[in-house]
Image: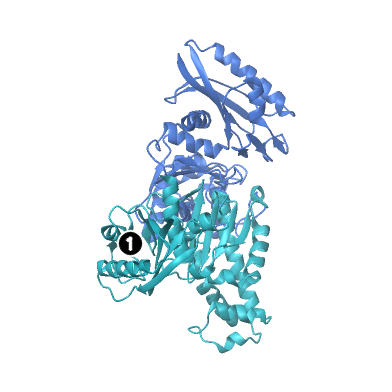
Chain colours: A cyan, B blue
Amino acid sequence: MKEVAIGIDIGGTNSEFGFVNHEGDVIAHGKINTIGYPDAKDFVSALCTKIEEVRKTIKEEIILKGIGIGAPNGNYYTGTIEHAPNLEWKGIVHLAEMFRKHYPGALVSLTNDANAAAIGEMIYGGAKNMKEFIVITLGTGLGSGIVINGELVYGHTGFAGELGHTIVITDGRICGCGRQGCLENYASATGIKRTVFELLAKFRDDSPLRAITYNDLTAKMVTEAAEKGDKIALEAFDYTAKMLALGIVNSVAFSSPEAIFLFGGLAQAGDFIFKPTQKYVDQNMLFVFKDSIKILPSQIKESNAAVLGASALVWKELAKA
Amino acid sequence: MKEVAIGIDIGGTNSEFGFVNHEGDVIAHGKINTIGYPDAKDFVSALCTKIEEVRKTIKEEIILKGIGIGAPNGNYYTGTIEHAPNLEWKGIVHLAEMFRKHYPGALVSLTNDANAAAIGEMIYGGAKNMKEFIVITLGTGLGSGIVINGELVYGHTGFAGELGHTIVITDGRICGCGRQGCLENYASATGIKRTVFELLAKFRDDSPLRAITYNDLTAKMVTEAAEKGDKIALEAFDYTAKMLALGIVNSVAFSSPEAIFLFGGLAQAGDFIFKPTQKYVDQNMLFVFKDSIKILPSQIKESNAAVLGASALVWKELAKA
């Protein structure tokens, strides 16, 4: 009999799930659309039906230890999704409770995606023996999961860890949150794209990026241009890294972690982002923290990271009990 | 028999101590010079001699439960003072160990001043029932003690909680730490003084502050000018509050506390600092945290706060055991 946790990643378009063992192996998985269910209850029913279908395909005998859910604007304390701009469901959705109706008595734990990524790193990844670390997810925006004293920081509200919404440039770039100068407008896939356009305006150098519209440009294209030595692309990485380093340096002043893990699309640019980030962190770290932190790539496989992170919530909860 | 803790506050000029009971009453106290002891061991010997002198004056029977020390650049994990710029002792000083030689077997706990203030707030002050809060000390610089999940955040190094050294203005004011734009250069007694001089240069309004040299100007004088309606002084408070609010808003994005306590000289300016700080916090808070935090004056009496905070370390350690 193998103990497994179900990890569920609620995305804006699709929701994926997997049956995951203690070692982080996904022994079965599936997905359904997130869109098309105006009532969240119908979505949960459809998802649970699919989960049971997939469960039947598992040959070995399993014991289900619980369900972990990573969801945008997920609140760990209440098991709710609150005012998620990228989901159809408005207001406060009692998602964990809906799952408990389908799995009476089961452990159901919910948090946001970046927090789930941090717990995934702690349970299956590079932070197994760490009590103080931060996972920064560099996707469309910048998410973060902060671990202090071996515990995820949820704060008084359940929404702590919004490093992407720390203001780093007064009167800076307009942010989706309605304010200006938040870190995620500089250090993220969208951030580097905005930086490229600023640099195309500022400099006169030839660049293949001049042939691409704002709508078409992706962080991957910037990486490809950088690989060919394009000056604008390299400069964009340098500036992105400088801003990311500022966020890291300020986070270290706050909670002095042992390591920062970078995760997500932009982290895949490898040396283009890691090298200048390390350079600026070294240059700008407060002296008492010099050489005290490691900046590392996430050790969780990108392809199923969200499902793994969500499943890790279950093992983390069981370890607490 | 009354249980007491000795609280010791190591300052640049003087070091004060007090015998403190569980309720936060200082039942006896004393002080010696900090300067004049090139060897820290001689300082500790002199201080312990003085402590024993004062102990003899206590009429009631006491049981000493431990010694708490608040010291600049104090490291909780190692009980050391490390590279404190304002003390005579260079390098790493094993202060807690030196005290243990004088009080064999005693509990001796050491941390920096701002962390001690936070523990004081938790044990004796306004944070008695809180698990998530931050104490910000607005003195010459800006110190902070961060409490998450009921525990002081020391981080991997023991030096966490350096909110005063988060960079808020890229290429901003030169900081004593060798970098630029750290929060404490704006939100502190020194910060408001620098702001006054910037405003005196920028505006043409008459102001009594134009008759005071930079060397002579104190935060208290700025408060007095503000009380008389001086435009420059009021503007200086507004800008100081704006920067403090930025630090608060970013801290909330990070750890989402229930309350922020303001402490120290500048916090004594009352409404001049609290009102605009609250205004800017309300204006600039990320929507998920709107109205989630209280900005409060410290509930610890300023006159013996450092000694109280240091003594509180002992009760906190005993509660852990």
Q: Callout 1: helix, strand or loop?
A: strand
- Give the quarter of the image for residue B159: top right
* Residue at 56% over, 47% down: B162
Above or below: residue A45 compared with residue A320: below
Indicate the amino acid at tag 1: Glu
Above or below: residue B62 compared with residue B153: above
Q: Residue furthest right?
A: B38
Camera-side residue of B126 and A34? A34
Whole-percent x and y of residue B4?
A: 49, 21
Per the image, the residue denoted by label 1 is A82
Whole-percent x and y of residue A298?
A: 57, 62
Camera-side residue of B209 and A267? A267
- Give the quarter of the image for residue A115: bottom left
* Residue at 61% over, 87% down: A208
Whole-percent x and y of residue A122?
A: 52, 54
Horizontal side of A303 relative to A50 (left or right) equals right
Instruction: Identify the image quadrant of the N terminus of chain B.
Output: top left
Q: Is residue B228 visible?
A: no
- Please give the chain letter of the residue carrying mark 1: A
